[in-house]
Image (cartoon, rainbow, N blue to C red):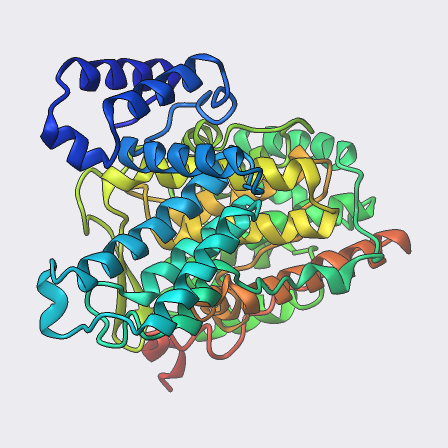
């Protein structure tokens, strides 16, 4: 259940009307303390924190309120009333409650967990005290939640004796890659590419895609938009579909042509989109990415823009309705599954909070780095029934352009699928490898633009054509 300030007030009033010893025990407060908390909310002290629809645990909120009252009465510092600080308090409180249950012999986990020593308890309490005086950012909260989950407080035999890990979970050293790019140029001009994307989409929808690639581009912006189009196509799969029997000769020809740039003769173009006007899979990929380049430079609502992006890519925009509905093969016999539908609203709100924070206070390269993380989360979460990767890619473009930054070209299919693999393999490290690749591309593109050109050949490697789908056709002699 989600709640706003108004709904929370109604919930507290109802609890007060039905007040009894059981409720007093559950909330660990008196009726008088609950009334004080209600009065505090009505005064507007929590207004900013409660202004958006969100789920708040009343028991955690009243516990936090009591601590704040006690510390303020003693003139002891305490962190600001923000959603981020509340989220961290909720996590540390969960740990303290479990430790108390271990000490009181009041939990089933005593079969394999033992209470802390006095010294260990003091270390955890010291961490708790430091949490109360720290103001957290959304990015820090996101990392803390991941680390607390890894502590496995209810089934880890080492808990609560792993006090160092507990402390590190609440004061994580988040390694950011973007600082080493600060001072490097970044392309901030997006109007020219918007106009070109609009023109090229008109040609494509009118069945004239061949006209786009027949002549040399007139500007670096046109080279860039053409390359964006090619980034959406799984080249070996497209050639295989059109020229199954002569796949080896066809793919060798197109591989050589694409390494030379974004100009293709009539025969080479047939290898890519011979049946493009009857193939419902390729055209939406191209028009979808062009649409992603036409957004205005103003903040976006991620949930609304995701649904719009799905439709631009001719996807259903339907979100998964049950756990494990989507399966994503990661290689080496590993699978991940779509997110539990109940968690999707909180997931999307978390992405929005992260985007808002980056938009308002992040440097340009910090913003790009954060948007790469959002793109990775969208791909891995698999929240849509179809088109999760293409939607995430286009959303990445839109987020960057919303802040006036021209996005780098993101290839997930080519170059041995290396970029997609880098997202998968570094997903537990905030996509570190993928971020390095894309930030390098961002910097390189800015350097080329400043010198008046843009070159980024499509690499169709031997590994890319060795997939089980069609490798027997390529290597057949």
196 displayed left or right of 108: right
Picture coordinates of residue 164, whole percent (x, y): 44, 73
Image coordinates of residue 59 in percent, x first then y, are: 27, 35
Q: Quadrant of residue 451?
A: bottom right
User: Relative to the observer, which residue lies in front, 271 or 42?
Assistant: 42
**Residue visible at 71% across and 66% down in the picture:** 260
Q: Position of residue 25 (x, y in %)?
A: 16, 36
Q: Nearer the viewer, residue 125 or 6?
A: 125
> Where 59 falls versus 445 (above or below)?
above
User: Is residue 376 among what the camera can see?
Assistant: no
Rendered view: 241 above or below 388: below
Between 99 and 154, the one lying in front of the other is: 99
Could you say which quadrant of the image residue 225 lies in? Answer: top right
Quadrant of the drawing holding the N terminus = top left
Residue that appears at 79% across and 50% down: 186
Tell me the quarter of the image containing the C terminus. Answer: bottom left
Residue with the most extreme bottom position: 477
> Residue 402 placed where, x, y %?
65, 33
Dividing the picture into quarters, in which one does residue 160 lie? bottom left
Furthest residue toward front: 74
Image side of residue 359 versus residue 428, left or right: right
The residue sitting at 69% across, 29% down in the picture is 297
Whether residue 335 is visible here, answered yes or no, is: yes
Q: How many marks?
A: 0
């Amino acid at each position: 259940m989600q709640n706003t300030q108004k709904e929370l007030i109604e919930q507290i009033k109802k609890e007060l009307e039905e007040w009894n010893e059981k409720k007093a025990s559950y909330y660990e407060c008196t009726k008088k303390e609950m009334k004080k908390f209600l009065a505090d909310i009505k005064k507007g002290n929590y207004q900013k924190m409660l202004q958006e629809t969100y789920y708040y645990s009343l028991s955690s909120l009243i516990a936090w309120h009591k601590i704040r009252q006690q510390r303020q009465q003693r003139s002891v510092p305490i962190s600001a009333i923000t959603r981020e600080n509340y989220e961290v308090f909720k996590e540390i409180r969960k740990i303290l409650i479990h430790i108390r249950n271990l000490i009181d012999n009041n939990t089933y986990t005593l079969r394999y967990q033992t209470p802390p020593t006095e010294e260990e308890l003091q270390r955890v309490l010291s961490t708790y005290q430091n949490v109360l005086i720290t103001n957290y950012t959304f990015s820090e909260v996101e990392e803390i939640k991941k680390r607390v989950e890894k502590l496995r407080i209810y089934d880890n035999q080492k808990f609560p004796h792993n006090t160092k890990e507990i402390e590190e979970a609440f004061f994580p050293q988040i390694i950011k890659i973007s600082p080493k790019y600060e001072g490097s140029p970044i392309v901030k001009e997006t109007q020219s590419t918007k106009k070109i994307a609009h023109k090229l989409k008109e040609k494509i929808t009118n069945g004239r895609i061949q006209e786009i690639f027949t002549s040399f581009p007139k500007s670096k912006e046109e080279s860039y938009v053409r390359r964006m189009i090619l980034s959406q196509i799984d080249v070996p799969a497209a050639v295989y579909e059109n020229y199954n029997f002569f796949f080896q000769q066809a793919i060798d020809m197109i591989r050589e042509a694409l390494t030379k740039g974004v100009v293709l003769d009539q025969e080479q173009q047939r290898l890519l989109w011979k049946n493009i006007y009857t193939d419902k899979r390729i055209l939406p990929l191209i028009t979808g990415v062009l649409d992603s380049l036409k957004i205005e430079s103003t903040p976006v609502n991620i949930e609304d823009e995701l649904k719009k992006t799905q439709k631009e890519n001719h996807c259903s925009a339907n979100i998964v309705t049950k756990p494990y509905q989507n399966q994503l093969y990661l290689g080496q016999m590993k699978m991940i599954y779509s997110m539990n539908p109940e968690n999707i609203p909180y997931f999307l709100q978390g992405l929005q909070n992260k985007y808002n924070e980056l938009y308002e206070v992040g440097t340009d390269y910090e913003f790009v780095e954060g948007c790469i993380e959002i793109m990775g989360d969208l791909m891995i979460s698999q929240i849509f029934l179809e088109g999760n990767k293409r939607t995430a890619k286009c959303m990445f473009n839109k987020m960057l352009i919303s802040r006036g930054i021209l996005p780098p070209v993101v290839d997930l299919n080519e170059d041995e699928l290396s970029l997609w693999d880098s997202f998968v393999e570094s997903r537990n490290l905030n996509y570190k490898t993928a971020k390095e690749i894309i930030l390098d591309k961002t910097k390189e593109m800015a350097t080329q633009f400043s010198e008046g050109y843009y070159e980024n050949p499509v690499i169709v490697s031997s590994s890319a054509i060795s997939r089980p789908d069609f490798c027997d056709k390529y290597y057949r002699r």
